[in-house]
Image (cartoon, rainbow, N blue to C red):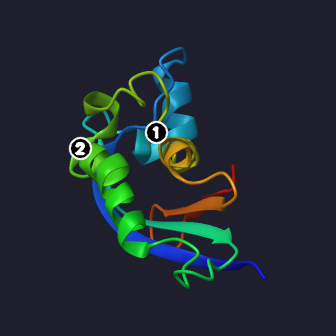
């Protein structure tokens, strides 16, 4: 019987939504205040879900301490208190929308999680706006 375990973390980061191939007017029309030349920040909430069978030897689907350490190493240490556009390789040429951030997070975590586990990422940009990515 599959069961899902979840780990919730948060990080703070600044970004600017901008397409350099568009005019200033088109960027403003599309991204509004998120296109602020001087960036803006969010308090992101991240939920990582792993689904699989319970290991009869441990009683775990996945060791939550291991998951916590993985998220810290691969996500928090890289993105927390950073300007995503300026301070990270992933978003130097990729618009750091919530959708793109969720995909990047999934791609950073997936190689470190056993293939038999299904993984999904939920990223809250605000209390009411969030995205989910299932890979």
Query: Is residue 127 among the parts visible in the rendering?
Result: no
Quick one: label 1 or label 2, which is nearer the N terminus?
2
The front one of 46 and 131 is: 46
The N terminus - image quarter:
bottom right
Q: Which residue is mark 2?
A: 82
Are there few (<14), some (14-19), or many (20+) residues within 10 Å of tag 1?
Answer: many
Q: Residues within 10 Å of mark 2 (few under 14, many from 20)?
A: some
Residue 4, given in percent of the width and then of the height, sits at 64, 77
Residue 90, x across and y down, in percent: 42, 30
Residue 8 position, x and y percent, is: 42, 73
Is 120 in front, or is 22?
A: 120
Q: Is 73 drawn above or below residue 11 in the view shown? A: above
Q: Report the disc number at residue 29.
A: none
Question: Which residue occupies 55% across, 41% down?
Answer: 107
Please say if 58 is above or below 110. below
**Secondary-structure class at tag 1:** loop
Task: Tell me, for residue 96, which label it has, or none.
Answer: 1
Query: How far is the residue under mark 1 from the one under mark 2?
Result: 12 Å
**Relative to the observer, which residue lies in front, 10 or 75?**
75
The local secondary structure at tag 2 comes to: strand
């Amino acid at each position: 019987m599959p069961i899902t375990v979840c780990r919730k973390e948060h990080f703070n980061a600044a970004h600017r939504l901008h397409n350099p191939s568009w005019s200033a007017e088109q960027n403003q029309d599309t991204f509004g205040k998120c296109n602020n030349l001087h960036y803006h920040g969010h308090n992101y909430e991240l939920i990582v879900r792993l689904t699989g069978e319970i290991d009869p030897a441990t009683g775990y689907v996945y060791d939550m301490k291991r998951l916590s350490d993985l998220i810290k190493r691969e996500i928090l240490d890289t993105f927390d208190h950073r300007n995503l556009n300026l301070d990270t390789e992933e978003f130097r040429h990729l618009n750091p929308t919530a959708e793109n951030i969720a995909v990047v997070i999934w791609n950073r975590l997936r190689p470190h999680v056993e293939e038999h586990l299904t993984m999904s990422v939920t990223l809250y940009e605000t209390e009411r706006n969030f995205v989910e990515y299932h890979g």
